[in-house]
């Protein structure tokens, strides 16, 4: 059963101790007093020396009573309570996992450790739950040891992009129950937190500047030109230094740049000949994740296409897309079909050019990614009446009762069927909705086609790979400021980009499937001017202590003693 | 050094109130005149010699020149000799009222007022009993005798006061032989009392000492570090005052009074202390009345 004080601020009352001592010291400033009986004191020794500022304390009852009364008053004002031995409290701490918390991590840990130590004293036993704000992550600690809970805080690595903390808070609330204490540690404290969480604000307003994106284009001479955008969230201009690193070796001299407040600055440069990737660096500020930006030239997967020479419209449509080359065996076919339909096992876009046209009617698009948000109202054409839907076909666009565009998928085969004849007039060849649907379908086929590609990813970005087999994947990640690391993952696992900048490669067996740069470029979390500290409510600890403790049974005695010392120490001499 | 100021003496506006207080007290009490024989001019009080009162005192043989009206004829019938009847003399007592006007008596208003109230009481009492009063003031070397005209006035002018007096030089006073000597003083002198009382009791005088005192003198409220200043000499003493020192002071105060009382008994001096805080009549009904320094009107 531990002693706690419901009002620790009463400790200031202890300043009365030196005050009392000072009063006794300063009594050497003798007050003049005219008397008629001074000769009666002639034989007593003179007590103080002329000119002395301080005099030594005398061991007088009055002094001790005054000191004791100050102590007792401080004790009474502090409201001593005894923690009940059977008291148990549940405390959950949800740490904001947004990446910008890295700028305040040490401050957050320092403040949180102090608060947890304070809170631990308000009950005999405490059940701790330390969990990150990423609801998909397991808790950092769950148990009754404060020491282990504090140690677990060191493993906290905030790296998420903008996300909603509510799921993590609600989950933590479920675990501590309605009476438990739920703390939400964040640098941007909102007015109120979900799930009845108490907010511990640990940030402070900071200026921050960082990369928002890099675009890479090849130059005619074969070199790569990069164009970087840097945003500065600050109220005053900032001076930064920019360096360009090439992983193959070499760093450019620093280039001093001036960033205007609240403005986007665009910089452009070229990589040395032969370099296919690079790293842009700003000299670091408090939030360092957006101060470095690895980049490479994205390369989509190459798709082999077979299209008859007479399909001029089809060639015009496909020419608009990169990395499509004629070749055999073809990955994508563009052909006309008859009533037999497209040949099985061939992916591609097929135009059903039958003889019987249906009636012109009202056009209607299904809710499907291939046709979503496209405008079909201007379509001037007529559907083929003889086209027959098979089980499993997905009509995407209807005209009246006839399907106009149909998606047919089975296994690895994906076929898009245009059930209209573009050669019979109309505007299908020029209608953007038709062309965009064709392009979306080509990309869909490309996406599901196994093969190498180079991508520019953001941290945590979902990675979708078309795999040639079911063997495990081998991943290699090289952080911009660290050593490469490799690990394997099942082929069916959900893949996402790492949470720090670097370069990622993915292999299956010896086949390289992906090379990607990974960068942090979420500007929605880069503005740190709104960060602010916010302590826990003053009455929070008092409420917990009230709940888990009982009043000191000796309080009336302290009152009586205080009155007695007051009388003896002050009142009686008067 | 604080110089005793003439302003310590009450002004003409304040003095009548003190006289009224003394006069009011004298309506109930008077200086103790009974149980004693006096010398003086013809009056109403038993004198030390033979007089013409109706109080028989003695017989003696007739000598020529005696008043034949006082021949005891009955004794002549028994003895055949002329025997004179002698009667007690009736006189008006002489009173010497001596005021200690040192600064210790005047600087504290309560004690100053009590001193002058007592003086007025004594003057009124003397006048009411037909005594001849001489009012002396003494302050160290300075001695002063008020004229009878001055005493008759409502305001007594301030007497000469020394700035740094020692003990009162009573030998400078011209006291009347066989007089009642009322000495009004707080007795706060750092000298043995025998010298003063011997002078007062000389010349067959009967001495009454009325000693006004303040309660703060015997129970001071001092506390902490003080710079104590003697009100007469201005001497300064830095003193830390605590409970222990107050005990020592009170013991010294008691010893001082006991020394005066012992010496007074030795010189047949009637010493009574008069508190300054109560009203004069109440103060006189205390120790002065108990010790016979004052008595009620018969």
Image: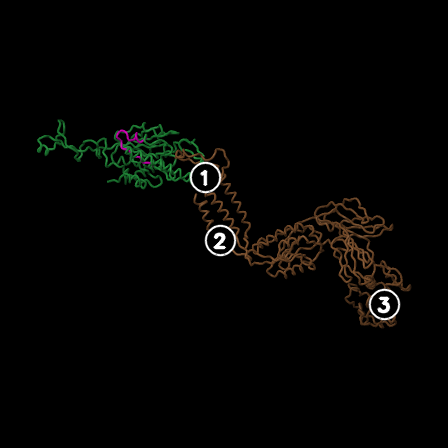
- Dot 2 or dot 3: first in sequence order is 3
Question: Could one spot residue A169 in this view of the protein?
Answer: yes
Where is residue A399? Give x, y as percent: 81, 69
- Say whether residue A551 is left or right of residue B218: right
The chain that appears brown in the image is A
- Nearest the viewer among B73 and A16 is A16
Where is residue A345? Give x, y as percent: 85, 67
- Nearest the viewer among B149 and A223 is A223
Chain letter of the residue carrying label 3? A
Q: Do discs 2 and 3 share a chain?
A: yes
- Say whether residue A43 is left or right of residue A396: left
Q: Secondary structure at mark 1?
A: strand
- Kindly check if marks 2 and 1 are in contact, taking CB atoms under 8 A apart as contact: no
Residue A202 to residue B285: above or below: below
Chain letter of the residue carrying label 1? B
Residue A380 is one of the magenta-drawn residues: no
Residue A502 to residue A57: above or below: below
Where is residue A75? Give x, y as percent: 51, 50
The residue pinned by badge 2 equals: A554
The chain that appears green in the image is B
The residue pinned by badge 3 equals: A345
Where is residue A233? Give x, y as percent: 71, 49
Of tags 2 and 3, the one toward the viewer is 2
Residue B208 is one of the magenta-drawn residues: yes
Q: CA distance from mark 2 to mark 1?
A: 34 Å
Residue B193 to residue B282: above or below: above
């Amino acid at each position: 059963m531990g002693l706690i004080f419901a009002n620790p601020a009463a400790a200031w009352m202890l300043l009365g101790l030196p005050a009392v001592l000072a009063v006794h010291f300063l009594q050497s400033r003798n007050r003049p007093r005219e008397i008629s009986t001074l000769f009666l004191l002639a034989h007593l020794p003179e007590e103080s020396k002329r000119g002395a500022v301080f005099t030594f304390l005398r061991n007088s009852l009055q002094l001790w009573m005054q000191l004791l009364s100050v102590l007792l008053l401080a004790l009474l004002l502090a409201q001593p309570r005894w923690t009940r031995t059977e008291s148990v409290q549940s405390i959950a701490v949800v740490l904001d996992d947004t990446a910008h918390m890295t700028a305040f991590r040490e401050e957050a840990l320092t403040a949180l450790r102090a608060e947890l130590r304070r809170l631990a004293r308000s009950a005999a036993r405490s059940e701790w739950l330390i969990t990150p704000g990423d609801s998909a992550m397991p808790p950092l600690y769950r148990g009754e040891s404060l020491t282990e809970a504090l140690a677990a805080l060191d493993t906290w690595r905030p790296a998420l992009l903008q996300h909603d903390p509510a799921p993590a808070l609600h989950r933590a609330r479920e675990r501590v129950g309605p009476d438990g204490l739920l703390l939400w540690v964040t640098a941007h404290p909102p007015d109120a937190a979900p799930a009845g969480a108490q907010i511990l604000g640990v940030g402070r307003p900071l200026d921050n500047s960082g990369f928002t994106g890099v675009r890479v284009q090849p130059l005619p001479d074969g070199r790569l030109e990069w164009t970087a955008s840097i945003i500065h969230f600050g109220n005053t201009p900032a001076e930064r230094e920019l360096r360009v690193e090439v992983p193959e070796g070499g760093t450019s001299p620093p280039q001093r740049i001036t960033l205007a407040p609240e403005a986007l600055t665009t910089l452009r440069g070229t990589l040395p000949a032969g370099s296919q990737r690079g790293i842009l660096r700003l000299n670091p500020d408090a939030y360092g994740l957006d101060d470095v930006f690895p980049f490479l030239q994205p390369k989509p997967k190459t798709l082999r296409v077979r299209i008859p020479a007479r399909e001029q419209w089809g060639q015009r449509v496909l020419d608009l897309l990169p990395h499509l080359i004629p070749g055999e065996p073809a990955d994508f076919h563009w052909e006309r079909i008859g009533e037999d339909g497209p040949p099985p096992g061939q992916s591609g876009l097929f135009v059903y050019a039958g003889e019987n046209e249906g009636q012109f009617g009202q056009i209607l698009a299904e809710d499907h990614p291939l046709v979503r948000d496209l405008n079909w109202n201007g379509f001037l054409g007529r559907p083929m009446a003889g086209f027959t839907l098979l089980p499993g076909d997905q009509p995407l666009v209807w005209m009246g009762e006839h399907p106009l565009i149909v998606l047919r998928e089975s296994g690895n085969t994906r076929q898009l069927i245009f059930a209209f004849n573009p050669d019979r007039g109309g505007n299908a060849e020029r209608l953007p909705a038709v062309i965009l649907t064709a392009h979306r379908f080509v990309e869909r086929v490309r996406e599901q086609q196994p093969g190498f590609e180079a991508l520019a990813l953001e941290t945590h970005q979902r990675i979708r790979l078309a795999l040639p087999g079911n063997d495990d994947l081998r991943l290699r990640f090289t952080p911009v400021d660290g050593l490469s690391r490799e690990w394997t993952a099942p082929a069916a696992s959900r893949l996402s980009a790492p949470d720090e900048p670097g370069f990622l490669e993915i292999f299956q067996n010896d086949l390289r499937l992906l090379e990607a740069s990974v960068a942090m470029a979420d500007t929605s979390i880069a503005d740190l001017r709104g960060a602010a500290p916010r302590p826990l409510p003053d009455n929070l600890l008092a409420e917990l202590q009230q709940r888990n403790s009982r009043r000191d049974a000796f309080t009336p005695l302290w009152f009586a003693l205080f009155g007695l010392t007051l009388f003896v120490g002050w009142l009686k001499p008067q | 050094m604080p110089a005793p100021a003439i302003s310590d003496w009450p002004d003409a506006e304040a003095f009548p109130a003190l006289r009224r207080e003394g006069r009011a007290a004298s309506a109930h009490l008077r200086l103790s005149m009974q149980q004693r024989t006096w010398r003086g001019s013809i009056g109403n009080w038993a004198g030390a010699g033979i007089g013409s009162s109706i109080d028989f005192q003695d017989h003696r043989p007739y000598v020529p020149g005696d008043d034949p009206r006082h021949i005891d004829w009955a004794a002549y019938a028994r003895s055949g000799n002329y025997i004179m009847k002698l009667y007690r003399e009736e006189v008006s007592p002489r009173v010497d009222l001596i005021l200690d006007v040192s600064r210790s008596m005047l600087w504290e208003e309560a004690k100053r007022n009590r001193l002058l109230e007592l003086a007025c009481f004594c003057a009124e009492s003397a006048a009411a009993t037909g005594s001849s009063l001489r009012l002396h003031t003494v302050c160290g070397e300075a001695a002063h005798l008020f004229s009878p005209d001055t005493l008759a006035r409502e305001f007594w002018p301030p007497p000469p006061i020394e700035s740094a007096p020692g003990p009162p030089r009573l030998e400078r006073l011209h006291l009347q032989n066989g007089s009642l000597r009322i000495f009004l003083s707080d007795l706060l002198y750092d000298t043995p009392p025998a010298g003063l009382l011997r002078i007062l009791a000389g010349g067959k005088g009967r001495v009454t000492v009325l000693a006004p005192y303040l309660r703060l003198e015997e129970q001071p409220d001092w506390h902490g570090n003080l710079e104590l200043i003697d009100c007469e000499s201005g001497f300064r003493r830095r003193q830390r005052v605590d409970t222990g020192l107050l005990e020592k002071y009170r013991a010294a105060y008691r010893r001082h009074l006991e020394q005066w009382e012992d010496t007074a008994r030795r010189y047949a001096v009637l010493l009574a202390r008069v508190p300054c805080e109560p009203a004069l009549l109440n103060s006189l009904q205390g120790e002065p009345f108990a010790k016979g320094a004052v008595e009620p009107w018969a």
